[in-house]
Image: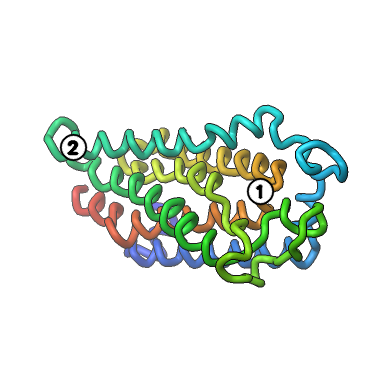
């Protein structure tokens, strides 16, 4: 048993602590990026005034263009695979213990990228995209994460492509049954989310903080479903 489990034996408490840590990490990282102007600086590294594609010269270069066109497919495929396994488990074709982890994967994609990111944040927060602000040839003023402009002012916050990419990490819900595979998928989801984020920044679609919060939102969703809603650690402990 790890020290974390020993100190906090109740899975729900561990889940809430994980969520608190994620929110704290997001806020602290955002504050750092804003205070030291890294959000704009890192984005500006991909912008060339007067260049092709309105200055975002790498927008259609490989692999960035391919990621924009097809980058959501892996996350969707993982969710479909989990849904198929869930049906198989429900019909007795696979172990019933896989049902809850499958639901974590499927609901993470629906709730994280679907409802929270694309449904609420992008439509309501009102942050202009890099390509739309005056610093990069646009007409709108830059807004940091803590300055939402409201509906109609922009859809930069947060990044939808990144959110679906990070969602691959939801396969980590199978950790009690397939530890090695879960760790690989968890790491792959983080790596793929970051790569997708670089692609969207290079295309003038998002700022680094948009990518950061897509990851935070998705991992909060995973933690909430895993620890609080389906209480998978509780089920594993009861079966031991």
> From this viewpoint, which residue is outermost toward the right?
50
- Crowd around label 1: few <14 · some 14–19 · many ≥20 (10 Å): many
**Foreground: 199 or 169?**
199
The residue located at (80%, 61%) in the rendering is 37
Q: Picture quarter containing residue 69? A: top right
**Residue 158 quadrant:** bottom right
Would you place residue 196 above or below residue 70 in this image?
below
Q: How many marks?
A: 2
Left or right of residue 88, residue 178 in this image: right
| Residue highlighted by disc 2 | 89
In the picture, measured across the screen, residue 183 lies left or right of residue 84, that is right
Q: Residue at x 87, y 42 (%)?
A: 50
Q: Is residue 205 above or below residue 33?
A: above
**How would you rate the neighbour count of disc 2 (Cα within 10 Å): few for under 14, some for 14-19, many for 20 or more?**
some
Helix, strand or loop at label 1? It is: loop
CA gap, disc 1 and disc 2: 40 Å
């Amino acid at each position: 048993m790890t020290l974390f489990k020993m100190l906090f034996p109740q899975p729900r408490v561990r889940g809430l602590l994980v969520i608190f840590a994620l929110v704290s990490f997001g806020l602290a990282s955002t504050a750092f990026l804003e205070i030291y102007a890294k959000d704009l600086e890192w984005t500006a590294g991909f912008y060339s005034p007067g260049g092709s594609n309105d200055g975002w010269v790498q927008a259609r270069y490989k692999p960035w263009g391919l990621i924009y066109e097809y980058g959501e497919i892996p996350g969707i495929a993982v969710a479909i695979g989990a849904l198929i396994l869930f049906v198989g488990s429900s019909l007795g074709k696979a172990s019933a213990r896989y049902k809850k982890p499958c639901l974590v994967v499927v609901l993470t994609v629906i709730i994280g990228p679907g409802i929270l990111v694309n449904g609420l944040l992008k439509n309501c927060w009102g942050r202009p995209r890099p390509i739309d602000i005056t610093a990069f040839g646009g007409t709108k003023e830059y807004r940091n994460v803590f300055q939402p402009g409201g509906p109609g002012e922009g859809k930069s916050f947060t990044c939808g492509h990144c959110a679906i990419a990070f969602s691959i990490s939801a396969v980590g819900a199978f950790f009690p049954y397939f530890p090695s595979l879960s760790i690989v998928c968890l790491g792959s989801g983080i790596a793929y989310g970051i790569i997708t984020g670089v692609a969207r920044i290079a295309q003038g679609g998002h700022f680094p903080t948009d990518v950061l919060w897509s990851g935070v939102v998705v991992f909060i969703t995973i933690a909430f479903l895993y620890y609080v809603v389906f209480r998978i650690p509780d089920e594993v402990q009861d079966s031991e």
